[in-house]
Amino acid sequence: MTERLVQLRAPGESREETGDRPAPEPGSDHVQPASRRVFIETYGCQMNINDTELMAGKLADRGYVQVEEPGRADVILINTCAVRENAEQRVRGRIGQLQQFRQENPDLVLGVTGCMAQRIGDRLVEEMDGVDLVAGPDAYRDIGERIDQIRFGGLERGQRLLELDGSERYEGMDAVREEGVTAWITVQRGCDHRCTFCIVPYVRGGEKNRDPSAVLSEAREAVERGYSEITLLGQTVNSYRWENWDFARLLRAVALVPGVRRVRFTSPHPNDVTERLVDVMAEEEAVCRQLHLPAQSGSDWMLKRMVRRYTVDEYLEKVRMLRDRIPDIALSTDMIVGFPGEREVDFRATLDLMREVRYDDAFLYRYSPREGTPATRFPEEDFVEDEVAQRRLEELIELHREIQRDIAENEVDRDVEVLVEEPARSDGDVLGKTERNKAVVFPGDEDLIGEYVSVRLTDTTGATFRGERTA
């Protein structure tokens, strides 16, 4: 899980302009007497970042400006993830910490949004003091209105907006985009796959795809606002369908939008990696030579229990197809160890798959039970002991690091193009990503953020490269 402090700004607005000015009433030239400042903290995946941007847009319509510190806010929103238990525990702790700001601002409104809110929103309101609003992923269209009703209209605190809406695709809503160089565009919400370990279909509902004309319009608007890299988002993004549009057609159309220089997408499902999609990836210059391809396990037995709907051989056939058409493609994956029923032979099969594919990057997890998912109903004796699961995870991580380091060392001395994203942690350096999603740190200042820079890779830790500018 990634914690993000999201600073947002409206179209055409500079960083300096998002600070301490009063918020005007929408449609009015007059300063609004009531303070309208919102602090948004985002946990989890890229889709949550995009959802935060949608909520910020609705709040901006009502005159709210974003602030960087919760102590300066009249409204605090925590946009949450429910994929893993530790994410929810961190949010519970954060809710408690934020109550301190009521001492100076007793009218503060604190809301919890997103997947955790959808999963346990009723319990949050009942069990934790100071939660004024819980809103699930289909409730953002009215969130600004509900917040103002709580603040100014006498609506009681503890509001619950938790109905899933099969028709809500958030068309017609303007996003106030996150500070950064990538425009996140959601093309699909929800999921129909229902893997036995996954909570997403229960907190986001079934698959809902957006009209391609709306996606393309949003891509053009992102270019107008200065973004040249676009990432298309969906729970199983490449299963996208809209009338006679499939994901391959949508991807090509976005790649051909004037001003788009890079296109990525996440997260695809292996079953929907088709020849047609791979052709687009190989043919369109703007589509990055990088793909996240979640495997979850290297054992057919485990894949069946997970209801992944492919075998290891079928998965490997997709990998071969990708590398035949795009030889230098960078692949990443997700793997789960300790899933109920996992035997040592199954874990060893996962290690074998890691060795065969040799992923450039991997997100490796120990199974985390999610209440309400089918996997929690497996027989008790199927559950893997914590110490066994932890040992397997550590062994898997060690193997991945060895492979990643070997791949990275073979890339040293290459010349690459880096899109600069932010200042690096090391003084005097900036950090950016290559087309193949490799992180590179090299000397430079903040003026380079958003620029494409030619860099020679000079050294690597395995996960990150050092570089020097070549031009």
Image: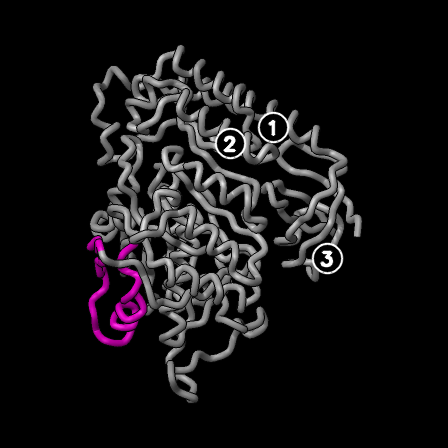
Report the amino acid beneath label 2.
Ala
**Left or right side of 5 for 150:** left
**SS state under label 2:** strand
Residue 19 visible: yes
**SS state under label 1:** helix
Q: Which residues are magenta?
A: 137-166
Q: Of marks 2 and 1, which one's residue comes earlier in the chain?
A: 2
Where does the image place residue 139, in percent across and percent down from the top left?
A: 27, 59
**SS state under label 3:** loop
Please tell me in which quadrant of the rendered image residue 195 appears: top left
Report the amino acid beneath label 3.
Asp
Contact between labelled residues 1 and 2, with CB atoms less than 8 Å apart:
yes
Q: Which residue is mark 1?
A: 404
Q: Which residue is mark 3?
A: 445
Which circle, 2 or 3, is nearer the viewer?
2
Question: Residue at 40% across / 65% down in the picture?
Answer: 56
- For the N terminus, give its image quadrant: top left
Label 3 to label 1: alpha-carbon separation: 29 Å
Residue 149 covered by magenta stretch: yes
Question: Residue at 28% across / 71% down in the picture?
Answer: 145
**Left or right side of 249 for 328:** right
Q: Which residue is mark 2?
A: 362
